[in-house]
Image: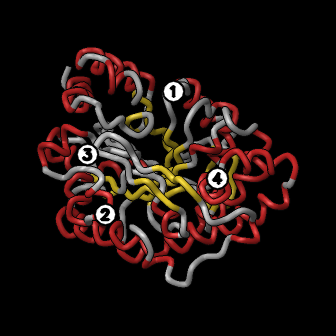
Amino acid sequence: MNLKENVLTVLSGEEVNVTPVISVTQIGIVEAMEKTDSFWPEAHTDAEKMAILGSSLYELVGLECARIPFCLTVEAEAMGCKVNLGSEDKTPLVMESPFQNASDIKIPTDFLHNGRIPVVLEALKKLKEKYGDTLPIIVGITGPFTLTGHLLGVEKMVRYMRTKPYEIESALDKALDVSMEYVNALSEIGPDIICVAEPTSATELINPLQFKTIVKPRLEDLSREINTKKVLHICGSAEPILKDMASIGYDGLSVEEKVDVKWAKEELKGGGKIMRVGGRIMTMGGEKSPKLIGNISSSQTLFRDSPDEVKKKVKDVLESGIDILAPSCGLAPRSPLENIKAMVKGRNEFYNK
């Protein structure tokens, strides 16, 4: 079984002999840029450099995937937002939006030709040509709620959820249309996994009821549109919304270190409720529940700790029963390459003890 088959087998709910070690979130780090001559911000706008950097951690230290792009601003930029592309150690940031209200939001007729969307599509083609049969290729997209925050401003969006909920519902539906159009373009090329990142829906920003009633229905609609393996990533303390996350129809749930793996695995077992999700029958809470991905701390373990400490944390997380080992969130650009190598080596040593 090659690396691609190993990951896809896990996400299909089947057993494997070795837990995969990948990243469904941002993987560009400065040391890899230096070794591959593929630096930010050029790698955000050059398909060749994006593909090289997106596969750099596989080539350099054996991380078992390629993953593009390196931020969550691609869709917002294509919608007309002004984006600062950052520097070699700073990710892009939405600086200004042309939209004041939901009624202002309109998808440009040439949306798929705007901004960096053509770059991502071309980089995906390059990765497919080089690694398509052997290595899982992951593309990250911005979830509808987080995209709505880019289009309206996060503070305004959170305020409107209390004062003008109809405004948010309308804006979210338009953001969902954007996500679906982008997903369909990606699907024509065929990534192995699409990771939907919804950091703005973390429980630190909105409450679980708002997630259940406002965010979850759009993520369900988006799930039905994705015809590859799909992962949902939500930052922060996801425990209060974990069961809702599990019922949406994604094959994997990517969580941060704030989520206790043993507890989460037990939560995902309970009940065994049979339901139809995205046109297929799933056993929620049984063997076909979404697989848990994570949760090696990106901000502490992989960024600040020693390689030995990384290995210890890897052992702990594997013993807790994680299904796919991965950073808890996007890698900090100044993360030491040696620590990413230690994550892979720690997994290998766990199975060779």
What amino acid is labelled 3 in the image?
Answer: Glu
- Would residue 92 be seen by someone viewing this image from the given angle? yes
**What residue is pinned by disc 2?**
45
Instruction: Point out residue 84 in the picture as x, y percentages from the top left corner.
Output: 43, 53
Instruction: Point out residue 280 in the picture as x, y percentages from the top left corner.
Output: 60, 64
67 vs 95, left or right, is left
300, 135: nearer the viewer: 300
Q: Is residue 239 above or below residue 58?
A: above
Give the residue drawn at x 49%, y 47%.
252
**What residue is pinned by disc 4?**
149
Q: Are marks 4 and 2 in contact (CB under 8 Å)?
A: no
Q: CA distance from mark 3 to mark 1?
A: 21 Å
Depth-wise, is mark 4 or mark 1 nearer the camera? 4
Q: CA distance from mark 1 to mark 2?
A: 37 Å
What amino acid is labelled 4 in the image?
Answer: Gly
Give the residue drawn at x 38%, y 35%.
327
31 vs 305, left or right, is left
**What residue is pinned by disc 1?**
261
Q: Which mark is residue 64?
A: 3
Q: Is residue 151 above or below residue 111?
A: above
Q: CA distance from mark 2 to mark 3?
A: 24 Å
